[in-house]
Amino acid sequence: MHRLYHFPLSPFSRKARLVLAEKKIEVELIEERFWEERSEFRRLNPAGKVPVLKVDDFILSESNAICEYLEEKHPNPPLLPRTPEERAEVRRLVSWFDDKFYRDVTVNLLGERMMKRITGVGYPESTNVKEGARQIKMHLDYMSWLLDRRRWLGGNMLSLADFSAAAQLSCLDYISDVDWNRAPLVKDWYATIKSRPAFRSLLSDQLSGFPQPPHYANLDF
Amino acid sequence: MHRLYHFPLSPFSRKARLVLAEKKIEVELIEERFWEERSEFRRLNPAGKVPVLKVDDFILSESNAICEYLEEKHPNPPLLPRTPEERAEVRRLVSWFDDKFYRDVTVNLLGERMMKRITGVGYPESTNVKEGARQIKMHLDYMSWLLDRRRWLGGNMLSLADFSAAAQLSCLDYISDVDWNRAPLVKDWYATIKSRPAFRSLLSDQLSGFPQPPHYANLDF
């Protein structure tokens, strides 16, 4: 039995959910307000972060460890290519989105505009929001550059790189912070990935007090 | 031919150097002042960070992708255990040190006290330094807790988790920011790992203008 402690607007939780769904692994979702630092949750993950995956009595945390584990235990469909070189390129991009995109963009936009309100730690810092708005352009341009050369972000197959990127972008799309018109190739890529069955659970996420914008779950946005 | 673009006080460069050395892969080290944003280096890694590994004409970046690649191409000696569960625990700790330890401690201590001076972006922020000094205690305690239960940080074998941790701590040790007396188990673990041949290149690092403290390269510190 798989149980995932997650938060709907955590991009790392979303990445784990996408990988679980793509591999058709049934999972029970438990929403965890991780910032409340429940002592029971701290025992599951001393880092205090979501996602945490419980597989029977075995506990995993850190989205990278979770996704690599799922890939090893459930190799079909594969989300990492075959050669070490191709795998390195996918993993480079996983780090790019999990680390660079997350800190350049997601923290500055979603963190300031949503998570501060949800967790009650103050008001958005406008310089950070501006920085995030500036950075997302650079990132969309880089993604366009990649998608101009490749079928998927990490190469010729759908991979963890695509799910890492889609996890970040889908959170930002919930607050309408993605200017899809800037990057038609990225929009096409996102439309393709959004229409996969694995994406359905994300599109039905509702955050109380923060309704979905109309385009969010629309496959023809 | 392996070539590594690195910076001596970059913990992620150090992790890659340790893994290369442990696997006895000869490498040419190129010191890269990554913050100067050399355009040639930007072409190697658009994220602008070290380490970058060049293997013949193939270019890799992001320390996680580099280490996983080296593990796949040069499986001996193994630095990841065999079962998916054990591997997940090692990867959880790699993320713990690369992400949490790095941001809680290394950025606040090494970043403020050294990197700001080296890169010429201002003076240490004392609140950050204090926060780093507070956080390192928590981290040493957590490492002690792990080492009280296991032979190595990630389990029964030396793994990427140990090298991730040692890479961070060795940078902090260069500026004498580790209170080894607080955590005898961590000190013993570090003495063991420091005496490995793979560590030698790190212990001979010299930063112009910032001499090594006497205990840094001493195996009996």
Image (spheres, coloured by chain):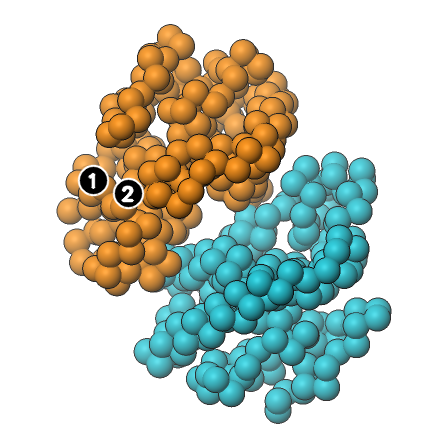
Chain colours: A cyan, B orange
What label sits on residue B29 in the rendered view?
Answer: 1
Q: Quick one: quadrant of the C terminus of chain A?
A: bottom right
Percent x, y of residue B3: 20, 46
Q: Is residue B28 above or below residue A88?
A: above
What label sits on residue B195 in the rendered view?
Answer: none
| Quarter assignment of residue A40 | top right
How busy is the neighbourhood of tag 2: few (under 14 within 10 Å), some, or many (20 plus)? many
Residue at horizontal 38 percent and vertical 8 percent from the top = B220
Q: Is residue B186 above or below residue B26?
A: above
Q: In the rendered view, does A218 fall on the left or right side of A134?
A: right
Kindly indicate whether the residue at mark 2 contacts the one at mark 1 (C-beta within 8 angstroms).
yes
Q: In the rendered view, does B217 fall on the left or right side of B3?
A: right
| Quarter assignment of residue A44 | top right
Residue at horizontal 42 percent and vertical 57 percent from the top = A91
Which secondary structure, mark 2? strand
User: Chain letter of disc 2?
Assistant: B
Residue at horizontal 68 percent and vertical 51 percent from the top = A50
Q: Amino acid at mark 2?
A: His
Q: Amino acid at mark 1?
A: Leu
Q: Which is nearer the N-term, disc 1 or disc 2? A: 2
Location of mark 2 (residue): B6
- In front here: B124 or A55? B124
Residue that protrudes farthest toward the right in the picture? A208
Percent x, y of residue A210: 79, 72
Percent x, y of residue A2: 71, 54
How busy is the neighbourhood of tag 1: few (under 14 within 10 Å), some, or many (20 plus)? some
Q: Are marks 1 and 2 on the same chain?
A: yes
Distance (Cα) linking label 1 and label 2: 7 Å
Percent x, y of residue A195: 60, 83
Q: In the rendered view, does B139 fall on the left or right side of B193?
A: right
Q: In the rendered view, does A140 fall on the left or right side of B194?
A: right
Residue A196 visible to an observer of this rendering:
no
